[in-house]
Image: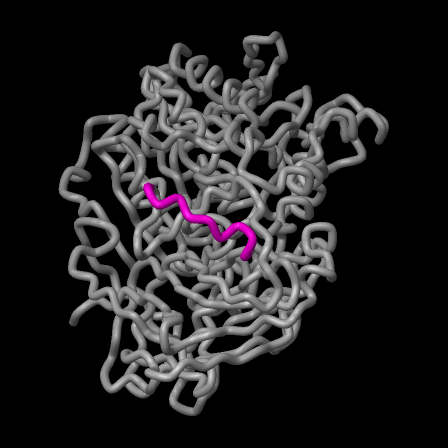
Amino acid sequence: MRSEIRDNMRIDWDIPIVMSDGVVLRADVYRPPDDAAYPALMSYGPYGKNLLLQDGYPWQWKITLSEYADVASGSTNKYQSWEVVDPEKWVPEGYAVIRVDSRGAGRSPGVIDCFSPRETQDFYDCIEWVAVQFWCTGKVGLNGISYYAANQWLVAARQPPSLAAICVWEGFSDFYREAARHGGILCTFLGRWFPVQVASVQYGVGARGRRNPLTSMSVSGDVELDEGSLKGNRADIGQELIVHPFDDGYYEARTPDLSKVQTPLLSCGNWGGHGLHLRGNINGFMLAGSHQKWLEVHGGEHWTIFYTDYGRSLQLRFFNYFLKGEGDWDRQPRVQLQVRHPGEKFVQRAEMEWPLARTRWTKLFINPSALTLSMEPAVNASHRSHSALGEGINVLAAPADQDIEITGPLACKLWISSTSADADIFLVVRLFDASGEEVLFIGATERSAPIAQGWLRASHRRLDLQRSTPWQPYHPHLETEPLIPEQPYELDVEIWPTSIVVPRGYRLGLTILGRDYDHGKTGVPSPFGFEMRGCGFHPHDEPRDRPAELFDSTITVYGGGDRLSHLLVPIIPR
């Protein structure tokens, strides 16, 4: 370890923190140059505490600078790191900023096992270590995006005594339903993410990896291990998800009991976060046991808003109140929404609860033969078939006769049959302008995304009636119940929440597919080797999970008569 003063900060590099089993993790501490005690703002994760954001994530940094000039303002940006706070903006506010490399990652030795109980215990131990340092007041707050947010739910449920507040910025809270298997269907994101963003900075890569230009230290430790040793020091998360198709003990160990989260919390979600974080932020807010909890939902890219003046001022007010006893956070509305309009326009509004109490829950009935969504169900039954891997069917509502706001969770009651013993259902809520052109939005991970999406594997259709609501069906995902080919079945499909003001003359649409949505336009390359065309980083394309004999079938959708397929929409009165 070494200590120095740079840019009006005391920086302690590579401080050792000994875990309960003797493994030594490494942390960097940024604090004011005096030796006074300050509240601590901490993050713990696997992305390499010494990897500069500009070096590791250049295209994300380029977008940030081009669209949000305030991010770079007031900082040399020499200490920017992926999805954690900029110490140059937080240390002058009277905080000690701590970044810990999680076990097996960056400069911390050990075995990487993401979101595991061992990792959560390490996080707990790090919080309590920070609290007793001479430069800490004893109050510790947690802040960060994505991984640095999701693991906050886990450690907060363990109730560390020194944990005073958490800001969970776009972080999932249900490992099975939000990160691994949407509606029971395997999402291949984590299997692709791990080698690119985690294994690339694994402890033991050493000089073969990147170096921090400020310290000349290797991001991935000073030891160099061969590929066999590196592989032996990491759990294969992609393979684990394949061999665990049901919500079993593997997922239970990585999913917090939210009722045990008692810490004051600010949960910040993204309307474009379908496929990873949005559901977790909203459910985390609703289900956390804390009496002091707030929800904020915004738009834009997954990583940018956190760093902006808007995001940072929100976080600062929250932490000043709970870590310093200062400010006016007690007047903050329980729910703060950036209501979305076409053209990436957002209008801020304060609310008191979620879902909004004044919601007018509206059923739009599906007519398969007419391809319509309407307020009244068709008297006569009809059906329409499509190839599961083809274009699906698209049903449209009538043009809006006035501006209509849709804000909240959605759900779909869908009657289907399949020519095989199973079917994967992909639902996409879309918006079309007066000319019939689809209106796409900036999603959390791509530039062209639809309004909302939902998924369900038909053989996982069983509901947990105790945990289900009309607007959020809950499936336990504990077993497979095969379909009898050609026999109709009733499915209840959860669609993740959204916010959109539908302008007069625009039309709402619902597309029913047996594969991932594709908007048909030129896509943006992802860091994971595929082009993003509507489902961001989160495709469902693992053939071992979707064998052709089951999922390359013909699906029939039924509506009208006694099979009233419908989309449940949360309309907010004007």
Question: Where is residue 205, by image quadrant?
Answer: top right
Which color mode does the image show? Answer: one colour
Residue placed farthest to the bottom in the image?
A: 435
Residue 82 vertical position relative to residue 522 in the rendered view, above or below: above
Residue drawn at x 55%, y 66% as measured from the top left: 487
Residue 548, position in %: x, y? 73, 61
Left or right of 240 on screen, residue 249: left
Name the chief secondary structure element in magenta.
Answer: loop
Residue drawn at (64%, 22%) of the image? 108
The answer to which of 222 and 390 lies nearer the viewer is 390
Taking depth in this image into account, of 182 and 346 the one nearest to the observer is 182
Q: Residue at x 26, y 31 (%)?
A: 290
**Residue 75 visible in the picture:** yes
Specify the quadrant that holds the C terminus.
bottom left
Residue 85 visible to the viewer: no
Numbered-mark total? 0
Residue plotted at (24% across, 26% down): 324
| 200 sits to left or right of 487 | right
Q: Nearer the viewer, residue 52 or 415?
A: 415
Q: Measured from the top left, where is residue 76 in percent x and y?
A: 50, 44
Residue 493 lies in quadrant: bottom left
Whether the magenta-drawn stretch holds residue 500 is answered as no
In this view, the residue in front, 421 or 128, is 421
Quadrant, the N terminus:
top right
Q: Residue furthest left?
A: 331
Vertical order, 233 against 477 (above or below): above
Determine whether 85 is above or below 100 in the image: below
Write down the region rendered in magenta.
458-466
Q: Position of residue 508 (x, y in %)?
A: 38, 78
The verdict on residue 461 being magenta is yes
